[in-house]
Image (cartoon, rainbow, N blue to C red):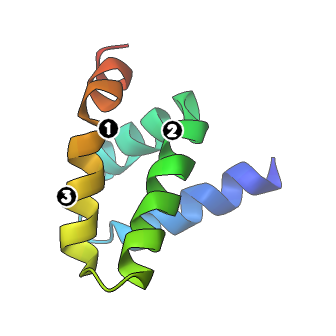
């Protein structure tokens, strides 16, 4: 319960300025498949540590997991 609360707060902080409805939609997606989003986050961190920019690393990892993300979005 505490972990979920903290996750929501982190997401809200990262998406500050985005409409509340979109933030809630993203939170629901993360709650549906937290393992996928943890894996994506870890891969992005690893690429940033190896010297890639955060934006380039994010785009590369998101493309690699595009199929999985589409499945989560369709549920």
Q: Which residue is mark 1?
A: 65
Q: Are marks 2 and 3 in contact (CB under 8 Å)?
A: no
Gap in Å between the C-alphas at discs 1 and 2?
Answer: 9 Å
Q: Residue at x 32, y 38 (%)?
A: 65
Q: In the image, 3: left or right of 50?
A: right
Instruction: Bin the neighbour count of mark 2 within 10 Å (Cα to Cα): few under 14, some 14-19, many 20 and up.
Output: some
Gap in Å between the C-alphas at discs 1 and 3?
Answer: 10 Å
Rendered location of residue 12, percent (x, y):
44, 64
Of callouts 2 and 3, the N-terminal one: 2
Q: Residue at x 53, y 67 (%)?
A: 10
Q: Which mark is residue 59?
A: 3
Q: Mark 2: which secondary structure? A: helix
Of callouts 1 and 3, the N-terminal one: 3
Tag count: 3
Q: Quadrant of the C terminus?
A: top left
Q: Is residue 22 above or below residue 69?
A: below
Q: Mark 1: which secondary structure? A: loop
Of callouts 1 and 2, the N-terminal one: 2
Q: Which residue is mark 2?
A: 36
Q: Are marks 1 and 2 in contact (CB under 8 Å)?
A: yes
Q: Is residue 8 above or below residue 35?
A: below
Instruction: Bin the neighbour count of mark 1 within 10 Å (Cα to Cα): few under 14, some 14-19, many 20 and up.
Output: some
């Amino acid at each position: 319960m505490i972990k979920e609360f903290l996750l929501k707060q982190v997401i809200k902080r990262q998406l500050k300025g985005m409409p509340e409805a979109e933030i809630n939609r993203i939170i629901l997606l993360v709650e549906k498949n937290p393992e996928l989003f943890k894996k994506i986050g870890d891969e992005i961190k690893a690429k940033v540590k190896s010297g890639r920019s955060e934006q380039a690393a994010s785009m590369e990892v998101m493309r690699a997991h595009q199929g999985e993300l589409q499945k989560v979005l369709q549920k």
